[in-house]
Image (cartoon, grey):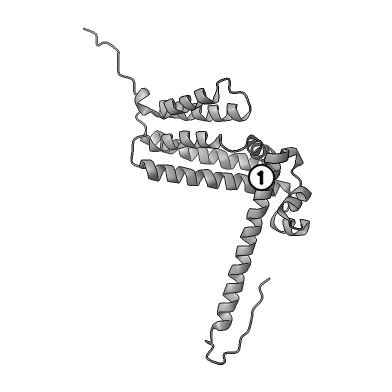
Amino acid sequence: MRIVFIIIPRYGLAPDAGIACTLNWTMDNATRSERSRATIIQAALTIISRDGPGRLTLDAIAREAGISKGGLTHQFRNKEAVLRALLEESTSRFNKFAEDYLMQHGADSPEAHLATQIEVSREALKQPQSVAFAILGAMGEDPSLLAISRDLDAKRIEHIKAEAADPELAVLRWAAARGLLLTSLFGLCPVSDEERDKLFSRLLDSKQWHLPNTTSTPK
């Protein structure tokens, strides 16, 4: 619904003032909507981190966000929609991290995309484990979310292969970083945090993966 204010030009008021008021009201309404969505997403994150994914309900989110349940369902129809928004927010945040990393370290440097994705996996470990579980749970409940994640990874691997001297080795390093991330999230990683960080650093160090050719030439 859009409210149009009709203003009669007088006392020097511009003839198009009514249009300006309409646009300003529309923009303010959109801003309020975005703020409400951000508040709801943050409330969901707080509940998951503090109480666990099992306590995430629409009633709990509405209480935490300080809004009515009707106001919540106006933005998100159900809990799955909130979880989907969490996944999208997480994806957007890590995409921003990747863009900043590429800009800082140089997109034209060797294996830049591989290094970026390894760093993204390491950065992902900084988010609360319960949030990661909730996002993984949402992906399990909605196969379309799995498809989105899989398609994004496929595009990333294309970039990684295109820049690598040894595409298979590059993908292997990417998979190792992803494995460190997933085993850590599920509490299955057998190494300490310090050792895991060293492994990430070694995966990043291209010099350690460019082995010299030691095959002797037949005489």
Residue that lies at the very extreme toward the left in this rendered image: 219
- Return the x and y of residue 7 as percentages of the image width and height: 61, 86
Direction from residue 51 to residue 212 in the image, left or right: left
Q: Label 1 is placed on what type of residue? A: Leu
Residue ID at (76%, 41%): 55
Q: Is residue 65 visible?
A: yes
Residue 122 rendering spot, x and y as whole percentages? 51, 33
Whether 12 is drawn above or below 123: the answer is below
Foreground pick, 77 / 5: 5
Badge 1 crowding class, 10 Å Cα cut-off, few under 14, some 14 to 19, many 20 or more, is many
Picture residue at 61% right of the left edge, 44% below the top: 87
Q: Secondary structure at mark 1?
A: helix
Q: Residue at x 58, y 82 (%)?
A: 18
User: Which quadrant is home to the N terminus?
Assistant: bottom right
**Does residue 185 appear to the left or right of 122 in the view shown?**
right
Residue bearing the label numbered 1: 45
- Residue 96 in percent (x, y) is at 49, 47
Give the residue at the far top of this rendering: 219
- Left or right: where does residue 45 sit relative to residue 204? right
Identify which residue is drawn at 53% across, 40% down. 151
Residue 168 can be seen, yes or no: no
